[in-house]
Amino acid sequence: TEQLLRNTEKLAVVGQLAAGIAHEIRNPLTTLKGFLSLLKSQATHKDNWYMDVMMSEIGQIERIADQFLTVAKPQTATYETVNLETVIRQVASFLHPIATMNNVQIGIESEAGEPALPCEPNQLKQVFINIVKNAIEAMPQGGQVDIHIARHPDSISARVIDYGHGIPQDRIPHLGEPFYTLKEKGTGLGLMICYKIIKEHGGTIGITSEVGRGTAVEIRLPLSGAVTR
Ligand code: ADP
Ligand code: MG
């Protein structure tokens, strides 16, 4: 955890710069993609294969750049008082097309009387998008993602539960390390960004998992609002 915290702090500083670079990288990539597909339409069979590889590598650079871009937003973000359930419902409807495509249902359950929470709503959305996406990706055959929102004396928690392939115990401590991914098309930046944002909100992330049974990711946010940044 110490190492993770140190990584997160370093990245908070480097993050702003990285996001700027990511933005600059996106435009030339779009040009590359355009001309590559133009060439592909005139290419021989063998060259075509090279171009598919190039296209998929460009895709990977784009995914990494996109993840870094999400770190750029805190500069302009302001704290608002919102209901966490509202934020999560917006995320669920945003991800609805992806969930449907993957045969996944998203169920949301919330304790009544949930008070509003001081937070940066767009940043929190980013967190739940990343976590729910991971849950969907853990169930290639489809299934159910359950989100339970609960109230505690000084905090609110949201548990995102999936019934997917799970995570081996020895890997759990590494989650959130930059570029730590076990996916072919992963960036290993999603959870790193989640940890950064939740830390800025003075909250915590807890991950429990069982291989072959599923994973629960619990976000806990203080009702008193963020620690000073
Ligand atoms: P990415 O999704 O791009 O790989 P993340 O930071 O979002 O990067 O996740 C890091 C790794 O954590 C994933 O590659 C995956 O192995 C593991 N992981 C995260 N969430 C889950 C989950 N719900 N079920 C199984 N594995 C998960
Ligand atoms: Mg992810």
Image: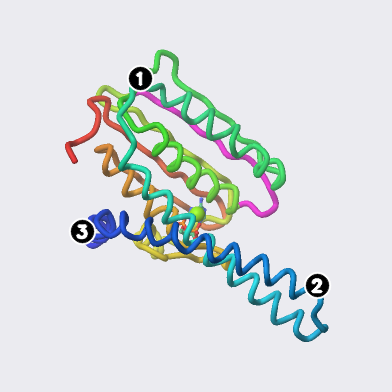
Amino acid at circle 3:
Glu
Q: Residue at x 34, y 44 (%)?
A: 205
Tag 3: Cα neighbours inside 10 Å, few (<14), some, or many (≥20)? few
**Magenta part, dominant SS:** strand
Q: Residue furthest top?
A: 113
* Distance in Å between CA atoms under marks 3 and 1: 31 Å
Q: Quadrant of the C terminus?
A: top left
Left/right placement of residue 215 relative to residue 75 reads: right
* Distance in Å between CA atoms under marks 1 and 2: 54 Å
Q: Is residue 140 magenta?
A: yes
Q: Are marks 2 and 3 in contact (CB under 8 Å)?
A: no
Label 2's element?
loop
Q: What residue is shown with label 3?
A: 2
Foreground of the two, 218 or 183: 183
* Distance in Å between CA atoms under marks 2 and 3: 52 Å
Q: How is the image coloured?
A: rainbow
Foreground of the two, 26 or 81: 26
For residue 41, the mark is 2
Image position, residue 117 (x, y; %): 33, 24
Image position, residue 1 (x, y; %): 25, 57
Q: Residue at x 26, y 61 (%)?
A: 7
The residue mark sitting in front, 1 or 2, is: 2
The residue mark sitting in front, 2 or 3, is: 2
Q: Residue furthest left?
A: 228
Q: Which residues are magenta?
A: 139-151
For label 1, being within 8 Å of ligand 1 is answered: no
Q: What residue is shown with label 1?
A: 116
Image position, residue 46 (x, y; %): 78, 86
Amino acid at circle 1:
Ala
